[in-house]
Amino acid sequence: EEEEEEEARLREGLQRELGEARRELDAERQERDTEGRLREQNQAVAANQLEELRARCQTLDRRLQGEMESHSASCIEREDLIRQMIEEIERLECERQACARQAEHAEQRLQEAQERHQKVISTYRAHLLNAAQGVMDEEVLLVLNAIWQMQRGKQRWGKVEDGEMPSIWLPGGLADGEGAMSTES
């Protein structure tokens, strides 16, 4: 009986140990299963996050590409505008230079015209002075007579006999007695 009791105790001890080993084994299996499920869940979460990050990167890449294309187009437009403005500036500069040359030529022509005018005025004054002094060149007298003939029908300069030239009004008049000069020298 002692042996049987001992055997029963041993069996009981072995069954307890076997029960504990089974519980430990079951706990380890559950732990491994839980770890496996957690690992799978973590892998699934990581895979989802990775996929989201890839999608976000692709979206950002597309946006960046669009911005680069827009910027490139904008740069091309700016370069075209700058080129057009440079061409317009060059054209306007050519026009300005041409206008400056024309102004210079016009100024030269004006100066020449003023010099000719001054010569004409000087000549006219000299002839008037000579006429006032009673001295008149034959050429001047012929020109004055021609002018008088042209004006004869257009206006009246005063009472003048046929063939006589009208008197020219100057302060003090012309000296020939009556204020009229004859066409004879």
Image (tube, rainbow, N blue to C red):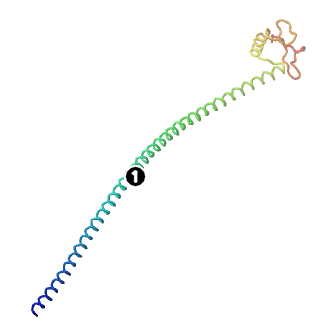
Q: Position of residue 130 (x, y in %)?
A: 80, 21
In the displayed structure, 182 sits above or below 19; it is: above
Disc 1, SS:
helix
Nearer to the camera, 20 or 83: 20
Q: Position of residue 73 (x, y in %)?
A: 43, 44
The quadrant of the rendering that contains the N terminus is: bottom left
Q: Which residue is mark 1?
A: 64
Quadrant hosting residue 166? top right
Identity of the residue furthest to the front in this view: 1
Please report the residue visible at 84 percent of the width from the left and 18 percent of the height from the top.
134
Whether residue 111 sits left or right of residue 90 in the image: it is right
Nearer to the camera, 14 or 90: 14
Mark 1 nearby-residue class (10 Å; few <14, some 14–19, many ≥20): few
Whether residue 35 sits left or right of residue 71 in the image: it is left
The quadrant of the rendering that contains the C terminus is: top right
Identity of the residue furthest to the right in this view: 177
Quadrant hosting residue 93? top right
Please report the residue visible at 84 percent of the width from the left and 17 percent of the height from the top.
168
Whether residue 8 sits left or right of residue 179 in the image: it is left
Please report the residue visible at 45 percent of the width from the left and 44 percent of the height from the top.
79
Please report the residue visible at 79 percent of the width from the left and 8 percent of the height from the top.
153
Q: Position of residue 175 (x, y in %)?
A: 87, 18
Quadrant hosting residue 127? top right
Residue type at mark 1 is Leu
In the displayed structure, 6 sits above or below 27; it is: below
Nearer to the camera, 72 or 140: 72
Q: Position of residue 149 (x, y in %)?
A: 77, 10
Nearer to the camera, 60 or 104: 60
